[in-house]
């Protein structure tokens, strides 16, 4: 019994320690972020950030679009099979439109980006750690946080919300295609219905969520990389744990945000 | 006043003492060669001097700045005057050789790109890599990486040069050229150098002072002649290349005898 308490206690402390490090790193990166901004910052950092944006955003585009299309079909079909029984097929439009804007767009994007880029961040930084590149940066009077982390974080902050919008669009498009084939609803008309059912509040909530997800993915990936000690095997483990932890934290954050928006929306 | 002074330095890894109350002074304009067996803590000492790790106790000062206690800004200022070639070379794998050498010049100076190109070419030429500037570190041999690391260390014309086994893995001709280069830098620019090496020949060629590390302490520090005349059995062993555990000790022989017999006795 005491043993169980001890294990629980130790586990809790180590998780708190992890979240603490994550916060410290977040603040440090925010402070270093100025250097990555265009015009006011260092142009080399900005160039690195743009490079990262393309890597996170553009390269993930086909995958995110396809995932959202599939999920759009699934949601529309599952919704239709139930709603048809009540003769409320047109509610499928609301379901897909609101579901994708508020929830599935940001969430699917976060899962795709954490698998592609979160792991890549961990692998890249972990390798730099093992090959002493991070130490080389330090002795060359660079700040690794500013040099490596800030461009990645900035890129994630830009790319993830953009991808979320794309994901929502493709999900909703899939819903439209389903409606077109099942009830011959005109696509233009469908999109007009969609626009009436989405409110500005939903879009703002989605953007806030995707910014939070971007923060989680970028920082968990980088922290896992920086915590690498030892050899190549440690790099491998860090990439796995970057994906697992960031996906987990994204879903926890999603639950928290959804709860907040639910109560704010009711008030 | 010494340029670098190490006082009572104690370093432990997981409770294992690697450096044990080490004292060392390095005078400006001198080449100090650090000798010592593999695993004796030479690289550890260099990492401490560069401020990459914190000691358990003791202090290190470079140009009057206490590296163990100073602010980040002071640390950066000192590091700008130091050129470092790591034992593992630690080149940036994502950058070409040219960019590796040019990095500090581009970021820490306001030199025109054409000037930077010229400097980079000169530094690479000096280590015999002028034709390989476009290659990435993965495309180089071990010895070429070592030389590239030296070129990168020289990029900013540092006041202090720290080289961790620069000639390991180089052929005798290139190693000798590197020795001459270090001597030339001392003569022409009064550079201060701290060089780790296992090559006795090279050590006695370039050193103004030799420091010999054993068991976390400095066994002998002095000029070439002082070290040559040193009667400490460990120092003699090192200089005369006497193996510490000769294979033909009676104990080993009898062990082998018994092992062979036990193998023969088996059915
Ligand atoms: N990060 C670390 N964690 C734990 N122990 C370490 C670490 N780095 C070095 N050591 C230990 O410190 C000791 C000295 O290592 P160091 O790399 O300084 O040796 P060295 O003198 O440079 O050897 P070599 O000539 O082989 O490069 C070794 O026993 C090593 O096991
Ligand atoms: Mg070493």
Image: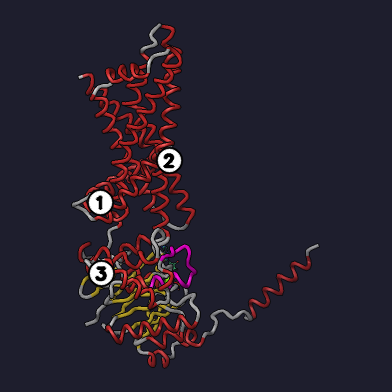
Q: Which residue is drawn at the image coordinates 38% and 46% (left, top)?
A: A55
| Mark 1 or 2, nearer chain start | 1
Q: Are marks 1 and 2 on the same chain?
A: yes
Chain of the residue under the numbered disc 2 shown in the image: A
Return the residue nearer the eye: A242 or A105: A105
Distance, label 1 to label 3, CA atoms, is: 22 Å
Residue density around tag 3, few if under 14, some if 14–19, many if 20 or more, within 10 Å: many
Establish whether ligand 1 lies closer than 8 Å to the Cβ of label 2.
no
Return the residue nearer the eye: B85 or A156: A156
- Write down the region rendered in magenta: B134-150
Establish whether ligand 2 lies closer than 8 Å to the Cβ of label 3.
no
The numbered disc on residue B80 is 3
A124 falls in the magenta region: no
Residue density around tag 2, few if under 14, some if 14–19, many if 20 or more, within 10 Å: some
Q: Which residue is mark 2?
A: A115
Chain of the residue under the numbered disc 1 shown in the image: A
Q: Are marks 3 and 2 on the same chain?
A: no
Image quadrant where residue A5 sits: top left
């Amino acid at each position: 019994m005491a043993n169980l308490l001890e294990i629980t206690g130790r586990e809790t402390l180590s998780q708190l320690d992890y979240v603490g490090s994550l916060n410290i790193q977040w603040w440090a990166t925010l402070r270093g972020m100025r250097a990555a901004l265009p015009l006011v910052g260092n142009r080399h950092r900005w160039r690195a950030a743009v490079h990262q944006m393309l890597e996170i955003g553009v390269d993930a585009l086909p995958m995110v679009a396809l995932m959202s299309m599939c999920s759009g079909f699934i949601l529309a079909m599952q919704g239709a099979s139930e709603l048809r029984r009540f003769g409320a097929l047109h509610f499928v439009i609301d379901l897909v439109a609101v579901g994708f804007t508020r929830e599935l767009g940001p969430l699917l994007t976060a899962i795709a980006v954490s698998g592609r880029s979160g792991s890549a961040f961990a692998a890249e930084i972990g390798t730099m750690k093992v090959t002493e590149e991070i130490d080389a940066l330090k002795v060359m009077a660079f700040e690794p946080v500013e040099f490596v982390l800030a461009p990645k974080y900035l890129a994630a902050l830009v790319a993830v919300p953009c991808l979320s919008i794309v994901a929502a669009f493709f999900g909703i498009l899939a819903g439209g295609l389903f409606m077109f084939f099942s009830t011959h609803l005109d696509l233009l008309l469908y999109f007009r219905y969609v626009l009436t059912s989405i409110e500005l509040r939903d879009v703002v909530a989605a953007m806030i969520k995707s910014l939070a997800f971007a923060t989680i993915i970028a920082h968990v990936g980088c922290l896992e990389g920086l915590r690498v000690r030892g050899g190549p095997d440690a790099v491998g483990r860090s990439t796995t744990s970057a994906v697992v932890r960031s996906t987990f934290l994204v879903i926890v954050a999603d639950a928290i945000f959804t709860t907040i928006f639910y109560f704010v929306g009711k008030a | 006043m010494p340029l670098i002074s190490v006082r009572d330095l104690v370093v432990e890894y997981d409770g294992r003492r690697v450096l044990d109350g080490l004292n060392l002074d390095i005078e400006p304009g001198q080449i100090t060669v650090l000798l010592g067996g593999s695993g004796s803590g030479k690289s550890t000492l260099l990492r401490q001097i560069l401020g990459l790790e914190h000691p358990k106790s003791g202090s290190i000062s470079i140009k009057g700045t206490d590296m163990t206690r100073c602010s980040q800004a002071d640390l950066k200022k000192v590091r700008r005057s130091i050129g470092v070639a790591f034992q593992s070379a630690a080149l940036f794998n994502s950058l070409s050789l040219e960019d590796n050498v040019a990095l500090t010049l581009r970021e820490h100076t306001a030199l025109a790109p054409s000037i930077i190109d010229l400097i980079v070419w000169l530094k690479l030429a000096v280590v015999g890599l002028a034709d390989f500037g476009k290659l990435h570190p993965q495309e180089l041999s071990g010895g070429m990486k070592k030389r590239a690391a030296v070129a990168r260390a020289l990029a900013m014309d540092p006041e202090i040069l720290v080289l961790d086994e620069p000639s390991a893995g180089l052929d005798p001709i290139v190693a000798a050229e590197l020795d001459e280069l270090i001597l030339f830098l001392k003569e022409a620019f009064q550079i201060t150098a701290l060089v780790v090496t296992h090559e006795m020949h090279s050590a006695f060629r370039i050193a103004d002072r030799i420091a010999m590390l054993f068991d976390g302490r400095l066994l002998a520090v002095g000029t070439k002649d002082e070290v040559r005349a040193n009667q400490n059995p460990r120092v003699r062993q090192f200089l005369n290349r006497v193996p510490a555990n000769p294979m033909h000790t009676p104990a080993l022989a009898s062990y082998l005898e018994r092992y062979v017999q036990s193998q023969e006795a088996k059915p």
